[in-house]
């Protein structure tokens, strides 16, 4: 029979009290004098949503990137379906939002990747003549925006993953083209393997890195919005489906640990779901709901490939036809000590 050391590379410690700074996955035995021994471990506890600082204005469909406590947004819309496209940009520091330099070209539904000091928004849609999708790329250097090499095609509502020098943009709405997938090295774009499920009108959640990403939910004319695909750096494969179909919601995490947040359910409807689901690399499990279900929203939390233990969900609309909200919700999943039955 395998021992714990052969499986994990270390012995189980025998201590007189809990260690002062355990790490995730650590296991130990507390054997205090004159008391029964107890085996304990350190793992992720149940996550919870809490209210964060409100955005400066009601907003939706921003291009966003960064971590929960260092988020950047660029562009967006004042209300769903309204002509109010914007170049406004904001940053969140874990407590409050503040204005930053505007993007150069107003638009919404851009893809975003990177960190609060080095990131980009890509593509998007604008109703400014000529109305339609855009192929523009704007880089954020920590203080301002500058234009970079355009995408090979116009696109909006795409998924994205990675950091500024190693990113991936996939799916989205491209007239006459479906399932496209493009890789970015910080300077140039390269066409790589297409999605298995087309998702021409993607609007799904996306997480991960350039070589290990997930495309979650979304919509195309023949799909219910529960499909999930996994990218291994060269090709996509279909993974286990979501419990609740959704589009235009939030998503954070990495390929083996992700969260899908709220969104429109069923895709194409006016209804939204408060439901959130967590991915462990194999299957989806329902977790704590957001306080207010929304679509046309944005989320961040994974700028450097972080797990889904800290995320941000903000803006959007409570139905597909109502005014936007400026509400922000923060997701936190702390580590906790648990006891094992060793009888």
Image (cartoon, rainbow, N blue to C red):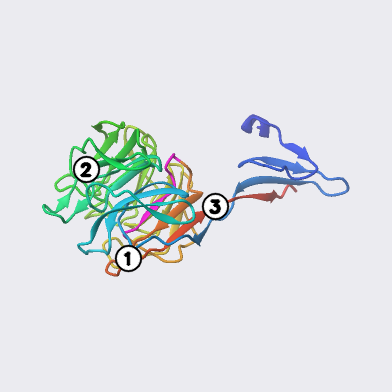
Residue count near mark 1 (Cα–Cα under 10 Å), binned few <14, some 14–19, many ≥20: many
- Gap between marks 1 and 2 measured at Cα: 25 Å
Residue 78 lies, in percent from the top left, at 28, 62
Residue 304 is covered by the magenta coloring: yes
Rendered image quadrant of residue 135: top left
- 211 displayed left or right of 156: right
Could you say which is closer to the camera, residue 141 or residue 287?
A: 141
Residue 279 lies, in percent from the top left, at 46, 49
- 75 displayed left or right of 83: right
Whether residue 188 is visible, yes or no, is yes
Residue 169 is covered by the magenta coloring: no
**Mark 2 — residue?**
136
Rendered image quadrant of residue 150: top left
What is the magenta range? 296-305
Residue at left offset 15%, top offset 55%: 128
CB atoms of marks 1 and 2 within 8 Å: no
Q: Nearer the viewer, mark 2 or mark 3?
A: 2
- Gap between marks 2 and 3 measured at Cα: 36 Å
Residue 257 lies, in percent from the top left, at 47, 45
Per the rendering, the mark at residue 324 is 1
- Relative to 190, say whether 80 is above or below: below
Residue count near mark 2 (Cα–Cα under 10 Å), binned few <14, some 14–19, many ≥20: many
Q: Nearer the viewer, mark 3 or mark 1?
A: 1
């Amino acid at each position: 029979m395998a021992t714990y050391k052969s499986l994990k590379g270390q012995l189980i410690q025998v201590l007189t009290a809990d260690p002062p700074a355990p790490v995730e996955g650590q296991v130990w035995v507390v054997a205090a004098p004159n008391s029964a021994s107890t085996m304990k471990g350190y793992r992720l506890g149940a996550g919870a949503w809490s209210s964060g600082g409100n955005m400066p204005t009601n907003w939706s469909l921003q291009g966003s990137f960064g971590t929960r406590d260092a988020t950047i947004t660029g562009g967006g819309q004042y209300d769903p379906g309204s002509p109010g496209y914007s170049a406004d940009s904001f940053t969140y520091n874990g407590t409050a939002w503040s204005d930053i330099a505007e993007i150069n070209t107003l638009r919404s539904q851009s893809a975003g990747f990177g960190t609060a000091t080095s990131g980009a928004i890509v593509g998007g849609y604008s109703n400014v003549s000529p109305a339609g999708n855009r192929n523009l790329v704007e880089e954020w250097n920590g203080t301002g925006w500058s234009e970079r090499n355009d995408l090979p095609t116009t696109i909006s509502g795409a998924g994205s993953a990675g950091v500024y020098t190693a990113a991936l943009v996939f799916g989205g709405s491209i007239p006459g083209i479906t399932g496209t997938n493009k890789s970015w090295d910080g300077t140039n774009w390269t066409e790589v393997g297409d999605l298995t499920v087309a998702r021409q009108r993607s609007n799904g959640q996306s997480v991960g890195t350039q070589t290990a990403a997930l495309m979650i939910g979304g919509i195309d004319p023949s799909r219910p919005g529960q499909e999930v695909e996994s990218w291994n750096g060269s090709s996509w494969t279909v993974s286990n489906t979501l419990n609740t179909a959704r589009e235009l919601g939030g998503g954070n995490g990495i390929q083996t640990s992700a969260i899908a947040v709220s969104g429109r359910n069923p895709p194409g409807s006016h209804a939204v779901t408060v439901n959130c689901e967590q991915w462990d690399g194999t299957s989806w499990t329902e977790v704590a709901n957001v306080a207010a279900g929304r679509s046309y929203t944005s989320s961040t939390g994974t700028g450097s490939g972080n797990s889904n233990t800290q995320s941000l969900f903000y803006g959007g609309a409570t139905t597909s036809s109502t005014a936007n909200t400026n509400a922000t919700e923060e997701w936190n999943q702390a580590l906790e000590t648990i006891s094992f039955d060793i009888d």
